[in-house]
Image (cartoon, coloured by chain):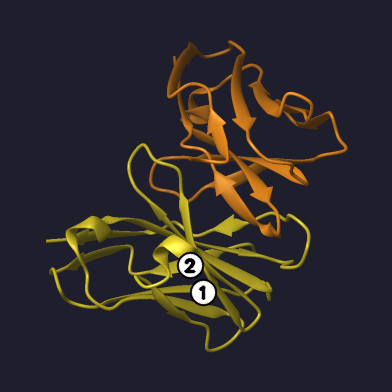
Amino acid sequence: SQLAEENLWALSVHEGESVTVNCSYKTSITALQWYRQKSGEGPAQLILIRSNEREKRNGRLRATLDTSSQSSSLSITATRCEDTAVYFCATDAWPNYNVLYFGSGTKLTVEP
Amino acid sequence: DTTVKQNPRYKLARVGKPVNLICSQTMNHDTMYWYQKKPNQAPKLLLFYYDKILNREADTFEKFQSSRPNNSFCSLYIGSAGLEYSAMYLCASSLLGGRDQDTQYFGPGTRLLVL
């Protein structure tokens, strides 16, 4: 079974709305990353949040990490059509902390 | 420049024939990775090079080979393609490779179709 998993397969919002994608993971981690993959492109990192951090921001993006419940969330405010993509969370696992294990992703569609 | 390049972008292969995919990066990154991505599934790590050391995942150990002739290039080799190899193959690189998680930079992928 996967070490990380997003809670929804797909999500749809209208431009300007806020949206949150959630992720749960199974092991003790050193960090969790969020990636976005747009159609025809490879995944691109959005945020890396370390296990001693509770929140990290990157522009309109905000990630949280709760190590006690082994969960993370990625929130996007003021969504735009170009935010349409698949969003993945990814974690490491002992002993390979430089290796990422991805979830299946949440497909976000932002409609005009 | 944080570009990872992959060639070819699309590859059609026949069952039983070999396939060789190429990845390159000019960021002088220590680690290069290969993932297999199928629709609606998580990217699955196949193997990675930390400098010249190859690490392969246990469940794909015999299915995929790789070489890294220099820091910039890394190949993924399938000796005999089967229908189940049809997928997107993603290459990534990261600066670090030791005991610390780091940003991975992905290429656009090679879409492999095996017929």
Q: Chain B hue?
A: yellow
Q: Quadrant of the N terminus of chain B?
A: bottom right
Q: Quadrant of residue B82?
A: bottom left
Q: Amino acid at mark 2?
A: Lys
Residue at point 44%, 78% (across, down)? B66
Which sits in the foreground, A25 or A37? Answer: A25
Q: Chain of mark 1?
A: B
Question: Can you identify the residue that label 2 sits on?
Answer: B5
Colour displayed for chain A in the image of the structure: orange
Residue B17 sits in quarter: bottom left
Q: Residues within 10 Å of mark 2 (few under 14, many from 20)?
A: many
Across and down, in percent, residue B26 comes to 61, 75
Of residues B103 and A2, the one nearer the viewer is A2
Image quarter in which the C terminus of chain B is found: bottom left
Of the residues under marks 1 and 2, which one precedes in the sequence? 2
Task: Left or right? Give the position of A82 relative to B40.
Answer: right
Q: What is the three-letter code of the residue carrying label 1?
A: Ser
Which chain does tag 2 point to?
B
Residue matched to label 1: B24
Q: Are marks 1 and 2 in contact (CB under 8 Å)?
A: yes
Residue A19 drawn at (x, y percent): 59, 16
Residue A110 visible here: no
Residue B91 lies left or right of residue B51; in this view the side is: left
**Label 1 crowding class (10 Å Cα cut-off): few <14, some 14-19, many 20+?**
many
Picture residue at 74% right of the left edge, 30% below the top: A59
